[in-house]
Amino acid sequence: MVASGLRPQPAGLAIAAFVAVITGIANAIHLPAALFPELGALGLVVFSDARHPWARSPGLLMLTPFLAALQGLWITRHLSYGPASVLLNVAVTITVLAALRSPIVPALSAGLLPLALQIKDWSYPFAILIGTGGLALVILVRARLQRNRPAELAAQQPQAEAGAHSSPVPPLRQWLLPFGLFLLGGLALVALTGSPLVLFPPLLVIAFEMMAHRQHCPWRGRYGRVLLVTNAAALVGLTLENLLGVVPVAAFLAVLATVTLLQLTRLFFPPALGVALLPFVMPHPPLTYPLFTGIGSLWLVLVVSLMEHQRPPSPSL
């Protein structure tokens, strides 16, 4: 992912094209939720690192977001947005991750999205299967092709970090306190600002990776860059959606611009693509969207910085 210059890398072009196709399909079948924002994050990993846990589990890649979306939709239809519904939503999704031993953390975003945007149509969980199913197919086709490759070529592929995400949901004592503080503070900021976008769905993915998987989080300790990229991605997505609308070329450009920003900052930060794509699924994205994402991201960085000051990460965890 990190490369010299500004030439788009194959993985970036591939996920931009994939998202553009899904946008066209979503428009054609009148299911906006088919453009699930976390497709950007999942797709960037799938196309750039075949050995990453997200890219090695095609079944879980489809099943985990689907189940999270299903429970998120049910909660949205029965409870109004508030601390109880958000905490229940997140708790159920984490339980799903633990029960399935699934590494697909972007399911947290799939669960919260209907509650944050008040999506109540039962088509939502099935709509996101279009994109996740497409990525699962990419994984399966690539695996079949790689089985036919010479062993010496396969050996040249980059090796995943040993033990990365070996426990999809680590013991609660390692991360529950800071994660709970982040959620409660985020909900207080939502009440203060009057917008659930302060606790925007991709932020849960960012937070969980930084707290529960902090030993293997590729953007840990690079918080200035995280804030910069998050706010810039929100601005890029909002601008392109406002100028061009929810069309394939706008989604393509949003992904490509965000990937280029990641290259410039030398940061492997896939959730940034979810931030850029979120305006494409909002009925009427407010111009204050980048401001709210900035507030939520800054709160997260403050909590994580406090956590690391109190207890630096240990290699033994």
Image (cartoon, rainbow, N blue to C red):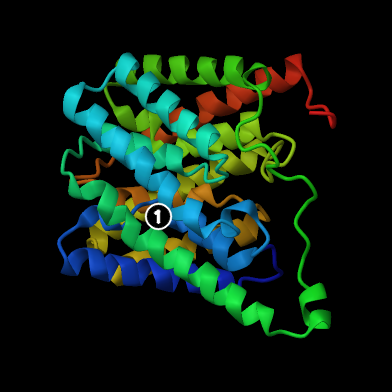
Which quadrant is home to the N terminus? bottom right
Near mark 1 (Cα within 10 A), the count class, few <14, some 14-19 or many ≥20, is many
Q: Residue 215, percent across and down?
A: 74, 36
Q: What element carries label 1?
A: helix
Q: Residue at x 54, y 33 (%)?
A: 98
Q: Which residue is drawn at 28% across and 57% down?
A: 34
- The reply, left or right, for residue 25 in relation to residue 108 is left
Residue 133 placement (x, y as % from top left): 39, 63
Q: Which of 152 and 21 is in front in this view?
A: 152
Q: State which quadrant residue 237 falls in.
A: bottom left
Occupied quadrant, residue 169: top right
Q: How many badges with numbers are in the image?
A: 1
Task: Give the percent coordinates (x, y) of residue 147.
Answer: 67, 79
Identify the residue at horizontal 69%, vertical 62% (top origin).
Answer: 2
* Residue where numbered disc 1 is placed: 236
Q: Quadrant of the C terminus?
A: top right
**Identity of the amino acid at label 1?**
Val
114 displayed left or right of 68: left
Residue beneath the point at 57% across and 39% down? 101
Rendered view: 212 above or below 5: above
In the shown orientation, is residue 82 left or right of residue 293?
Answer: left
Residue 59 seen in the figure: yes
Answer whether residue 281 is visible to the viewer in this image: no
Relative to 82, say whether 212 is above or below.
below
- Extreme residue toward the front, this view: 99
Which residue is at the front of the view, 83 or 66? Answer: 66
Q: Position of residue 56 (x, y in %)?
A: 60, 59
